Amino acid sequence: MEEKTAPALPDEEEYRRYDRIWRRVSPELNPYPEVRAPRPPAAPPRPPRREDDGKPERPDGPPGAEALRELLRDELSAAQTCRYLARQAPSPEARRTMLRLAAEEAGHAKTLQALHFLLTGETYPVTVVLPPQARLPWRDRLRELWHAEADAASSYARAAERTRDASLRAAYERLSADERRHAETLQRLLEKAL
């Protein structure tokens, strides 16, 4: 009988090769951070802001990078939730609708990633893992998602009001309108479920 041995763990050079492949396939992910060399900054670092000058950096500007990151995480979470609900859908039409909403939410995340890069000069690779979902009836899940979409519409509307940058304002207004449309779509699905 042939004796089998456990495969050897990849060495550092193999991890580097795997990392190069990942950079081509999905540059926003960083599955091997221990072998990826630090990248040079994309833009020259800003001089440190003096604390005693009393002036905020851009009080009327777009939300900060952390606010954009939070919006981005919310969009990715919504996309995953929609994909999860597509599997729970009571009809093929509802399944298609949820998959379409998931694709649109993922598109919103791409828009926010681009805005983040434009504002900071840095990419923000993010992976959101959806926690285990409670087994709720379809209509209760639609209700939860409807509230999340309505809240997202309001968040984007507030972000649009805070910025003076016309292109950012247009992007936030478009995202706000999309989220309102998503809430209306979910309401129609709920009407069919009752």
Image (spheres, helix red, strand yellow):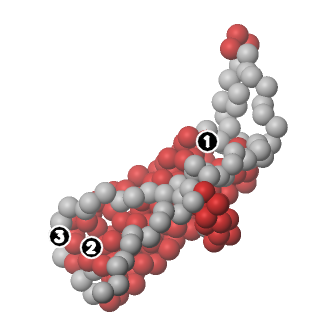
Image x and y of residue 59, in percent: 66, 30
Q: Nearer the viewer, residue 36 or 160?
A: 36
| Sequence-first tag of 3 and 2 | 3
Q: Residue at x 39, y 58 (%)?
A: 129
Q: Quadrant of residue 67?
A: top right
Q: CA distance from mark 1 to mark 3?
A: 37 Å
Given contact means CB atoms under 8 Å apart, are the residues at marks 1 and 2 in contact? no
Q: Quadrant of the N terminus?
A: bottom left
Q: Nearer the viewer, residue 20 or 46?
A: 20
Q: Residue at x 40, y 66 (%)?
A: 80
Placement of 88 over or under 113, stated as above or below: below
Q: Residue at x 21, y 65 (%)?
A: 140
Of the numbered discs in the image, which one, if any, rests on residue 5? none
Element class at badge 2: helix
Q: Residues within 10 Å of mark 2 (few under 14, many from 20)?
A: some
Name the amino acid, label 2: Leu
* Residue under numbered circle 1: 65
- Residue ranking furthest to the front: 1
Placement of 100 over or under 129, stated as above or below: below
Name the amino acid, label 3: Pro
Q: Residues within 10 Å of mark 3 (few under 14, many from 20)?
A: few
Of the numbered discs in the image, which one, if any, rests on residue 137? 3
Q: CA distance from mark 1 to mark 2?
A: 35 Å
* Residue under numbered circle 2: 190
